[in-house]
Image (cartoon, rainbow, N blue to C red):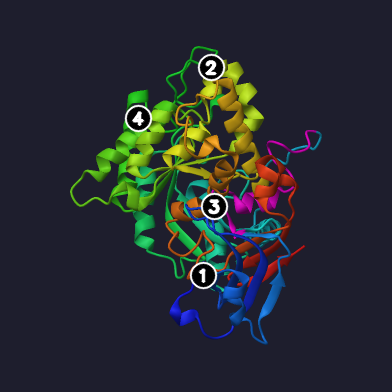
Amino acid sequence: MTRMDAAESTGNADLVMRGGAVLVMDAAASRASSVAVRAGHIIAVGSDAEVDHLVGETTRVIDLAGRAVLPGINDSHLHGSWLGARWPHTFFGGDPAVEQPTGALVSTRAERRAAIGKAGQLLTELGITSYTEPGIGPGEDSGETGCFHSEVIDIYRELADAGKLSQRVTLLALYGVLDGPSDVDVVVDGIRSCVAQGEERDPRWFAIPGVKIFGDLIPLSRQAWTSHAYDDGTHGTLLVNGDSIEERAEGLAAMVREAHLAGLQVGLHATGDLTIDLALDAIAVAEREPGAPAARDLGHVIIHGDLVTPAQLKRMAELGVWLNTQAGIAAQTNGWLAGMLGEQVAAQAWPLAAAIDAGVLVLSSDSPVLGFDWRVGVADADARILATQAGSGGGEEGSGSGPTGDADARLHALLRAYTAVPAAQDRADAWKGTVEVGKVADLVVLERDPFDVGAAGLPGVAVDMTVLDGRVVFER
């Protein structure tokens, strides 16, 4: 089972982990018992006997003693600067007796840098080696919290250049207003300036592949644009300035097309089914223009997607568009959603099984909206799938067969949604996201094999070690 390039078969490894369950997290659910690392990259994956010859006098050897090794966790929607400034306060799942902070949380460069550093330390202790900052930039330079200011981009760039980032960071530039209506002209000008900046110095540590655009808000505020009627008879709206819903829809489509034609990834905050339809239409139109890139090559993302339909998920798979969602939000707010849109709509929301079967599901935390514990995220996702299937007699569309019908296959798919699949969302799956030869040695060691406890038991499995770029950066 050895995976080793001939060029790597001689010479000592810097680090060898052996005697455990190495979960590759490829599509085939491959396993090994040992992994070897040199110069920040994986050089061998196989049995202990197949890797032992790489152990030399200077090699650090870690006896896993049955523990599990996974690729480093990639939280693909996490507000690092905001998390560091707010922690331990979260909007959902925290202590209800604790008063939420309001107003400016950070105001200076030093405070913003400290917030990023604090978040980095917290994430390292949970095995998180990559994350996406989904919306930082000049659109929020006057924002209330100060956490989304464009200076945050400069700080990330500075930390990356100095080799001081605790995680690999992907960032989406924000030119509109956070959670508010944006002007089309402002966002389009921002898209053009983003292109003019070019690629970052080392995209493996810090990359800005695209832009964040707000399509609508959330069903819980009756602001997701949806075909379903809310309890007050309304259908929500779009977060684009305009005199009519038609004008706002035209403006949102124009922003999506502009970003696509510029070769930028679009991270679209879209929770309503009508907003998602509009976005997919705009992407399909844009990629048909002469000389336009294929949507699959840009890896656009529907963020949240609470009311996405199975039919839309199939269309997303055809276009190569990801669904980045948070199972914890479903766990925390499903009852609230039922009160606003009815039990039937709530039962059909967050169709995670169909998203897995379509091959488009990416899981994330949206921390500090939720906590950043990916183990809880996996457990919440599994519970959502089981509850949805039970509520529909096992008949959620897209879940009658395939990986969601088997507990181990389902857990494998959910773990991939925090590792290999977000690497693909980052357009970085050629060099991270699985435990394979040639990829960066970003790894997490768990005290037990997650398949021994299942998704529900995963939150009780401790993170024992985090490896970033071949360096052990956390040990429990």
Report the quarter where the C terminus lies: bottom right
Mark 3 or mark 4, earlier in chain: 3
Amino acid type, label 3: Glu
Q: In this view, does 221 lie to the left or right of 122?
A: left
Mark 2 or mark 4, earlier in chain: 4
Task: Provide the residue designation for mark 3.
Answer: 133
Mark 1 or mark 4, earlier in chain: 1
Q: Which of 281 and 427 is in front in this view?
A: 427
User: Answer yes or no: do the residues labelled 3 and 1 have beta carbons within 8 Å?
Assistant: no
User: Tag on residue 344?
Assistant: 2
Q: In this view, does 436 lie above or below 254?
A: below
Task: Provide the residue designation for mark 4.
Answer: 249
Q: Distance between the residues labelled 3 and 1?
A: 36 Å
Q: Residues within 10 Å of mark 1 (few under 14, many from 20)?
A: some
Q: Percent position (x, y) of residue 441?
A: 56, 68
User: Tag on residue 2?
Assistant: 1
| Count of numbered circles in the view | 4
Amino acid type, label 2: Gln
Q: Percent position (x, y) of residue 130?
A: 57, 58
Amino acid type, label 4: Ala
Q: Is residue 376 above or below residue 397?
A: below
Q: How far apart are marks 2 and 1 (CA)?
A: 50 Å
Amino acid type, label 1: Thr
Residue found at the far right of this picture: 97
- Range of the magenta residues? 70-96
